[in-house]
Image (cartoon, rainbow, N blue to C red):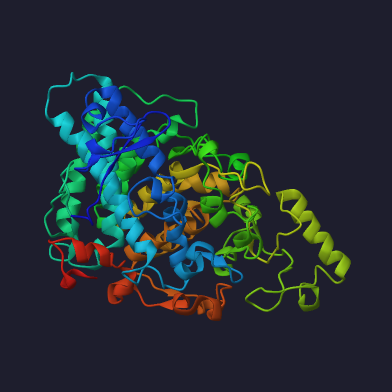
Amino acid sequence: MLRKIKFMLFVIAAITITSCSEDFLETKPTDAISAADALATAENMALIINGLHRGLYAQSQTIFPGGNTARAGEHYWLPLGDNIAGGVIHSARANNLGWQDETRWISHTQPTELTPELLWYHRYNIIGSANAVINRIAEGDIPVDGRLNEIAGQAYTYRVYAYLSLVQHYAKGYLIGTPSSDPGVPLLFASEPPFNSEPRSTVQEIYDQMELDIDAAIGFFEEATPRSTGSADAKSQLNIDVAYGLKARIALSKGDWATAASAAARARRDYPIMDESDWKSGFNTTLLPEVIWGSNVITTETTFFRSYFYLIANDFNGSQVRNNPKLVDRRLYDKIPDTDYRQDLFLANAPNTNTSAANGNGGFANNTNPLYPTQEAFQAAVDSIKSVYGLTNGHNTHPYMHVKFRQQNPGSIDPDDIIYMRTSEMYLIEAEAKTMMNDIAGAQAALSPLGEARDSAYDATVFDTQEKLMDHIKFQRGVELYGEGFLYTDKIRWDEGIDHAANGGSGASQTLYQDGFQQDKPSVNDAWIFKIPQAEIDANPNLGPGDQN
């Protein structure tokens, strides 16, 4: 199955790649080890797990045959959720890597496009390698100790992570469909060719498997060697907290509110909420105290112009950034109270220096902001922003540009860490789950620690109905998790469409955004569902044309 997929066993510190294909023994590279050797001991299997960590941010051609340099794992997949759903606004035309095609709803709606194809193969390669570890441990002849339990826990957690991504992109949302009959994705348990699987399982069957796997992961982690602390690299390792965080995400997406609330509370318990200084530091390292899980990107294996910060940060020194500052939705910004310090990281009054801006208002000649009555005042504001945030002379500025994500070395092309899970998300999951259970006091209690940490005048008790709480949680997720990739799945869960023109407008250009400017809600609009790669349908005997979304 899976277009003759050759899942990768990543081994040793240099991260060489071994294929378990039939021709492997004839073409074995000198710096790789055989699949049998890679699975022989707990320490060898740990190298496979470390390879999966790196695979989260490597360019896809280093992960599986047929990959492409234009996609570098979570560098691309994570911000994609905000790009497709319209949470991070493009200010001008800039289409490196097809990034603007995503905003226009061109890529994921076409079965031959790179995005649906590589996301599918990336996730199944994770599953294939996880299966290899899981199946080997199940044979029962490797001595069981804390280290082996840690590896088993990580393998099961990775499999859950991959399946959750697949079912949330290539199937109808659990809460807006009929999961018992809606087609999901194929379940794969094999760890060697020919990787046979069943046809598409139902959405419910995928969720059932994820729940079995995440509980298995938690069980292994309970008897595992604890994850080390104190380093950015340590947080790239999956542990029991990551497993509980994924359990919370699964439960939230299916409406299992009680489980979502309890798992989220458990996941965050050892990760204190960031203070103002940390929140304003750029979101560029997993060392931030509330980070539960993230990739510690190795600078010597940088992806440069394929990186997360190239796609999201306004200080990265690339043309896609310099010409196209990313903005916050004006409607969201206008809701941020002056007492909330997060307002500081969205520059509503930044001058528009880009004469190619989509709104046609670039340059001092088109300036309407009374703060800059002269060209000298206009330029002084530009110079101040560039000086404070490390932008180069070539960077444009634009009203409502964000400075939430900033490089550790601003104005460079250096890579930085990618954050996947943090405490604030877990508070918001608990608050949403308790709101949906109509536990008003419980939701207020979950919101208070986060809200009070961000807003000096915060009072959760004013949100005293289910409707008020949900509106506020949507606001909090929009501001707190801006650019962290959640909006696509949020909109599916909430069954909300995209309308950049509504309520005064987001600031996006209809000419620039095209089909992405307005989209009906997911329950009546299957364009939210990614197309299955045509290559998969052509090659997989268990899938046919009728299986296409």
Residue at image position (62%, 48%) is 413
Q: Position of residue 461 (x, y in %)?
A: 46, 53
Q: Position of residue 391 (x, y in %)?
A: 71, 53
Q: Position of residue 295 (x, y in %)?
A: 45, 40
Q: Is residue 548 above or below residue 446?
A: below
Quarter containing the N terminus: bottom left
Is residue 267 something that shows in the picture? no
**Residue 325 relative to residue 102: left or right:** right
Residue at image position (39%, 50%) is 61
Q: Is residue 485 above or below residue 281?
A: below
Asked where in the image residue 144 lies, by quadrant, the reply is top left
Front-most of residues 148 and 457 = 148
Residue at image position (17%, 64%) is 183
Q: Is residue 22 above or below residue 362?
A: above
Front-most of residues 250 and 144 = 144
Quarter containing the C terminus: bottom left
Residue at image position (73%, 54%) is 392
Q: Position of residue 258 (x, y in %)?
A: 26, 48
**Residue 137 relative to residue 427: left or right:** left
